[in-house]
Image: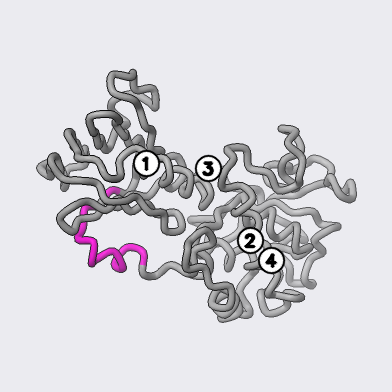
Amino acid sequence: MPEGDTVWRTARRLHDALAGRVLTRCDLRVPRLATADLSGRTVQEVLPRGKHLLTRIEGGLTLHSHLRMDGAWQVYAAGERWRGGPAHQIRAVLGTAERTAVGYRLPVLDLLRTVDEPRVVGHLGPDLLGPDWDAAEALRRLLGTPRRPLGEALRDQRTLAGLGNVYVCELCFLLRASPWLPVGRLPDPWRAPELAKKLLEANKNRAARITTGSARPDRRLWVYGRAGRPCARCGATVRSAGQGPATAARPTYWCPSCQPPPGPADPTRDPPPPPN
């Protein structure tokens, strides 16, 4: 599942393959970009912004993409067989003399002027892996909605850019806070952005996401994906329920012992089943 660390690695891989090189091939396979041809232009840089990818190209243009749940960019050497999926899943091809970048299942692909990038990323909060990370601003945004459940606030990219569902569940566990705890009742709230930053920094250079300190496949995460199994810290049964609007509820995992409910109105007392 692509989160900020995945996008950061993808941007670095694309930058290493394309930056400073002239595009010899450009194929954007979405209807509104079908006639766009960037061949002959030099790729200047590829930058991550939260979960967004910005490929800046000579002439003041930016190719904006977003991976969402299952999108991916793969890089191949010249002449190498493409293995990222069937041809009908390809949405973008950017080729140079040495490398070809292929975007699969990209749900978002736009071509815009570089000066217009704020239109697609200007709403984002401080980027946890960005050079302009601002912990004080992240805390201000987090506390700006004190009644909002912690899990929902952390998933909101306008609060912190880069956290996805896996990190939100793990972060709530490490904070010993229920995902349904109102943000304004979070003890030492400054720890939330600080710990989020540490988690993503620790994982940005490795494909296997680890929050427990153990590299064993069955012990890498504390609670995410572990519903019905014993908590590795206390032995209580990890639980799961949907959190957020019914049409977009995210499966949320927590330990009812390590993360006690915030009060009698806590919906985790009788959680609904997770969405299909």
Farthest left residue?
35
Mark 1 and mark 2 residues within 8 Å of each other at the beta carbon:
no
- Dots 2 and 3: beta carbons under 8 Å? no
Q: Which residue shows up at 34% across the image and 24% down it?
A: 86
CA–CA distance in space, label 2 to label 3? 17 Å
Q: What label sits on residue 125 in the rendered view?
A: none
Above or below for 85 versus 196: above
Upstream in sequence: badge 1 or badge 4: 1
Please say whether residue 112 is one of the residues in the magenta stretch: yes
Q: Secondary structure at mark 3?
A: loop
Look at mark 1 in the image and give the residue it sits on: 14
Residue position marked by numbered label 2 in the rendering: 196
Which residue was labeled with disc 3? 1
- Count of numbered labels shown in the rendering: 4
Nearer to the camera, 76 or 121: 76
Residue 145 can be seen in this image: no
Q: Earlier in the sequence, mark 1 or mark 2?
A: 1
Where are the magenta residues, as a range? 109-121
Residue corresponding to mark 4: 180
